[in-house]
Image (cartoon, rainbow, N blue to C red):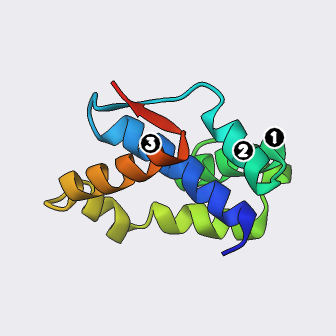
Amino acid sequence: MEAEQYFAITSVRETTVSTWCGNEYEPVPDGLLKVADRLGVDFSKIEDAVGAAMKLVFNREYDRAALIPHITRGVTSLYSDEEYKKWHGPQKADLCRGWGNTLVELGVLRKK
């Protein structure tokens, strides 16, 4: 997997876990920035692309110039109907625990 896609997935999952997994995790200040630096990824460019793609997924106004095709495809796949059902169904606890632990290890989230 390409570094930019890895970072985009990490960014989306940080938002997913901190939003959908109750009050168990919170973002680490500058955690995503440090991951981007370790990967050699342009943080601002990719975060803008992730943000625009997420707005696109949720039918909100977005900056078309910020979209990057491979990032948009990755983000939209994480918000497919199938993925949504997983995160809101019986697998939710396992997904929260698994992704939560991974993101804690990466330094992106911390337990509250």
The image shows residue 52 at horizontal and vertical percentages of 69, 47
Q: Amino acid at mark 2?
A: Glu
Checking the image for residue 104, the label placed there is 3
- Disc 2 to disc 1, C-alpha distance: 5 Å
Asked whether the residues under the numbered discs 2 and 1 touch, taking CB atoms below 8 Å apart as contact, a structural biologist would say yes
State the quadrant of the N terminus: bottom right
Residue drawn at the location 60% of the way across and 25% of the way down? 29
Residue drawn at the location 75% of the way across and 56% of the way down? 39
Q: Residues within 10 Å of mark 3 (few under 14, many from 20)?
A: some
Q: Is residue 29 left or right of residue 47?
A: left
Residue drawn at the location 66% of the way across and 55% of the way down? 7
Numbered disc in front, either 1 or 3: 3
State the quadrant of the C terminus: top left
Q: Amino acid at mark 3?
A: Val
Q: Is residue 108 visible?
A: yes
Checking the image for residue 44, the label placed there is 1
Instruction: Name the quadrant containing residue 33.
Output: top right
Dot 1: what SS?
helix
Numbered disc in front, either 3 or 2: 3
Checking the image for residue 47, the label placed there is 2
User: Nearer the N terminus, badge 3 or badge 2?
Assistant: 2
Residue 75 vs residue 97, the one in the foreground: 97
Residue drawn at the location 29% of the way across and 57% of the way down? 95
